[in-house]
Image (tube, coloured by chain):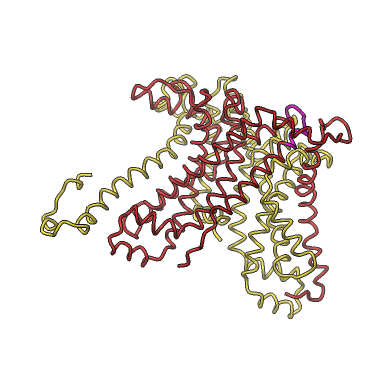
Chain colours: A red, B yellow
Amino acid sequence: MKMPRGGARFVIGFLALPVLLYVVFVIAPYLQAFYLAFTDWRGVSSTPRFSGFDNFTRLLADPTFWAAVGHHVILLLALPLITLAIALFFAFLLNMGAGTKGVRGSKFYQAVFFFPQVLAVAVIGVLFQAVYRPDKGGVLNGLLDLVGIAPIGWLTQPRLALWSLIAVLVWQAVGFYVVLFAAGMANIPKEVVEAAELDGCSRSRMFFQVTLPLLWDTVQVAWVYLGIAAFDGFALVATLSVDRGGPDGSTTVLPLEIWRTAFTYSKFGYASAMGVALFVLSLTFAVLTLRVTRRERIEY
Amino acid sequence: MSNLTVERPAERAEPAGPRRADKRAPKVFNGLSHLALAIWAATVILPILWTFLASFKTNTQIFTEPLGLPSSIKWDSWGRAWEKANVGQYMLNSVFVVAVSTAGTMLLGSMAAYVLARFSFRGNRFIYVMFVSGMVFPVFLALVPLFFVVRNLGLLDTHTGLILVYISYSLPFTVFFLTAFFRTLPSQIAEAALIDGASHTRTFFQIMVPMAKPGLISITIFNVIGQWNQYLLPIVLLSGDVEDKWVLTQGIANISTNAGYQADWPSLFAALTMTIIPALAVYLVFQRQIQAGLTSGALK
């Protein structure tokens, strides 16, 4: 629409408040973060003192930082792979388990699977404390006890703890992607599936050579979503893990270290440098993923 | 599963080949599909059901017989959670904060999106990109400066501060989504209204908003759930000695930390159940809209 009479005043009137709020609470803090990352500010002095690349040099020599980065790498590989594999499997069962009509109870399963998605991660963290209790009183260890397996320290064994947290993240995410993929699969034209069936196409070939290529766009978006989630993990680690990131730092993630460094140790400059590192990591991931997964789109 | 072994006489006459395998395979496949789907459904339902039952047990019963049923249904742990552990207060705070901030987000977000979608003026593209770029940055990058921005405005430990921050951080996705949505709406009706002498403001509220209802509903649901489940921003911005202002997620996490010291596990599980039940109720009623709203970001 061309700008009609009285339009300029209207445009300014409608944009003023949202832009003002956005600049004050979002844009300004993001810009300041890049500045604070180069200072040794601890919140006491009125003007932060410039310290060059000191924070970043220290960061690169900080074992906690590298431990956290290592956990993000594990999350980045495990979370999308496991979640997408399970979600695609279930979505395929729901849609094509009984020909093209969809399995009985499909709506019920989708409703149940999706529910964890509406719960707060903090609430889920508290919920799984009961599930993962290290003695026989826990839900999981109680079940294992029935078949005579001794209690397992799901969250207390350093080598197991991160995987226990990943299981919870997968548990919460699967339903969302089942619904997403099921919707995508329902959009695949019946004729394509029927033609493949007539040609004697097996179910696994159907999945890999018909369904997956036609769903590739959605899978790609899902991968990016889960990849971005792999750089978070704050709420779950803060509410579920032993000693917030423990035992012994074995489950810590950058967001948690940023929060702790800033609001427990008051090292605001150093925390901002960690924020910049997190930003660089997640941006690199996003750019790489888009490069690697970009494929010819199949029109149907 | 008995049909696994049943050989039908009619089929026997047919030559062995892919056709015959096809007829039997779906049944095996169906049985196994349902088993897999049922197992996943159980992993979703059981922890929640366990929490609900645990709220009626006694302290010792919870952990000595984790898989047993409560001996009697007593609601006193629910009373303790609501009154002493302040769940009632936290819930009211959450309702208030989310109601105001979602309303604010939708009002400001749709105003900005409408102007950006429908009017050409210098800086339009710049403002749009500025809003949308907010989706790329991790909140943790802004965390430290944001804390000081809110503190310097005297809004730390206030609901006002939290609400303004919620609105600001919800704007990128809201503006992104609604701009795309407003662009798809026909422009003739709005132009006709303007020619008839309606002001731009009136045209927006009385013609465009009703037309954009489906998009507005999706994104409202998206924002309500996102803001209701926030954990990071409340613990940073309501971090002082203001327990009476806490929202539900931070309250629950805190009750969980204290449950061990006070040895009052039943009331922790009562508090958890009280948190989950409203979410479940809303989910059951608006399931279709919630699934559509949350997945709307991933579908183009």
Give the residues drawn in magenta, as a range: A263-273
Q: Residue at x 17, y 46 (%)?
A: B5
Residue B28 in percent (x, y) is at 26, 48
| A69 w.r.t. A104: above or below | above
Residue B111 in percent (x, y) is at 72, 62
Looking at the rendering, in which quadrant would you find the C terminus of chain A? bottom left
| Left or right: residue B102 compared with residue A194 | right
In the image, residue A269 lies in the stretch drawn in magenta:
yes
| B113 w.r.t. B272: above or below | below
The foreground one among A21 and A56 is A56
The foreground one among A40 and B5 is A40
| B258 w.r.t. A221: above or below | above
Instruction: Choose top left, top right, bottom left or bottom right for residue A229.
Output: top right
The foreground one among A234 and A192 is A192
Looking at the rendering, in which quadrant would you find the N terminus of chain A? bottom right
| Left or right: residue B203 compared with residue A124 | right
| A217 w.r.t. A78: above or below | below
In this figure, what is the number of numbered marks?
0
In the image, residue B216 lies in the stretch drawn in magenta:
no
Q: Residue at x 76, y 45 (%)?
A: A30
Residue B183 in percent (x, y) is at 65, 68
Instruction: Choose top left, top right, bottom left or bottom right for residue B38.
Output: top left
Q: Main secondary structure of the magenta part?
A: helix
Q: Residue at x 78, y 74 (%)?
A: A3
Residue A95 in percent (x, y) is at 38, 56
Q: Residue at x 67, y 51 (%)?
A: B135
